[in-house]
Image (cartoon, helix red, strand yellow):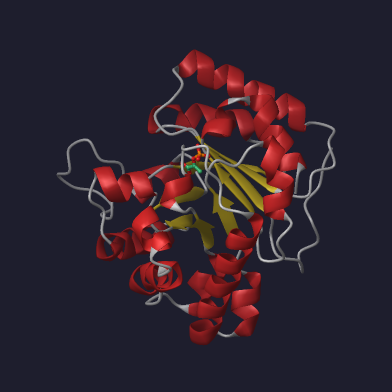
Amino acid sequence: MWSLQPQNMRKKIVAGNWKMNNDWQEANTLTTQVLDLLKDRGIAAEVVIAPPYVHLEKVVSMVSGTNGVSVAAQNCHQESSGAYTGEVSAAMLDSIGVQFVILGHSERREYFKESNELLAQKVNAVFDHGLTPIFCCGEPLSIRESNQQMEYVTHQLTASLFHLEPAQIRQSVIAYEPIWAIGTGKTASAEQAQEMHAGLRQHFEQKFGQEIANNIPILYGGSCKPSNAHELFAGPDVDGGLIGGASLNAEDFVAIVDSL
Ligand code: PEP
């Protein structure tokens, strides 16, 4: 069996965002392989699997009983119920044992026009139902090229999270994902990631104080793979990763988990 780090250290998390990939047979195989590979390893991270909605209940049941492995949804609606055809609420996710919800992924922001204000409502819905948000933030290439990434990303956090109670912020997970690095094969350097993570932590500290800021897990996402994960995760403010493409291969995903 493998175990988590002691409670007093910042939680380390590696989350796999499958996006809109894998039919049920593929999802079943991938989950089985990941669980098999994690078995008997001394892993110091919480592992989160984020399959598409239709597989959530089955994946929850597959991971139940495996210490340190949880399931995330990739999105949810801001209302608990109602006439919102095609949508899924945080209440529904909670009712089937989902623990995390990824919110504000750049693909949701871009293709589904999710604004910082809408995301603030979704964050509230997630907390109303006892779930944990994995809140994504990150700048496009044009902002990075004009060296305004810190202002841009801290604004995303202020607009969507700074209304929360300290107890809620304490429960939150942040994922910094520079848009120019997502699915492009182009990774932020370890220095760029660490610099941003430290800046975000400082931003939380200004509003919520040092103790809370020190305990918020901030994950890096963007073309993270077994060959670069160790270097990226070495930054003292980098607490793990949100993994897209590489989470579709069990060996690559678990190798990334091993890099922490
Ligand atoms: C993501 O979509 O959250 C992500 C980090 O993707 P990739 O790892 O494929 O860049």
Q: Residue at x 52, y 75 (%)?
A: 167
Q: Could you tell me residue 140's position as x and y percent? A: 37, 55
Query: Which quadrant of the structure image shows residue 83?
Result: top left
Query: Which quadrant of the structure image shows residue 201?
Result: bottom right
Of residue 26 and residue 129, the one placed in the foreground of this image is 26
Q: Residue furthest top?
A: 25
Q: Residue at x 70, y 37 (%)?
A: 227
In the image, residue 94 above or below residue 8: above
In the image, residue 75 above or below residue 237: above
Relative horizontal placement of residue 19, taking residue 118 as reference (left or right): right
Relative horizontal placement of residue 256, taking residue 127 as reference (left or right): right
Q: Could you tell me residue 190's position as x and y percent? A: 65, 56
Q: Could you tell me residue 257's position as x and y percent? A: 71, 41
Quadrant, the N terminus: top right
Numbered circles on residues, count = 0
Query: Which quadrant of the structure image shows residue 35?
Result: top right
In the image, residue 97 above or below residue 9: above
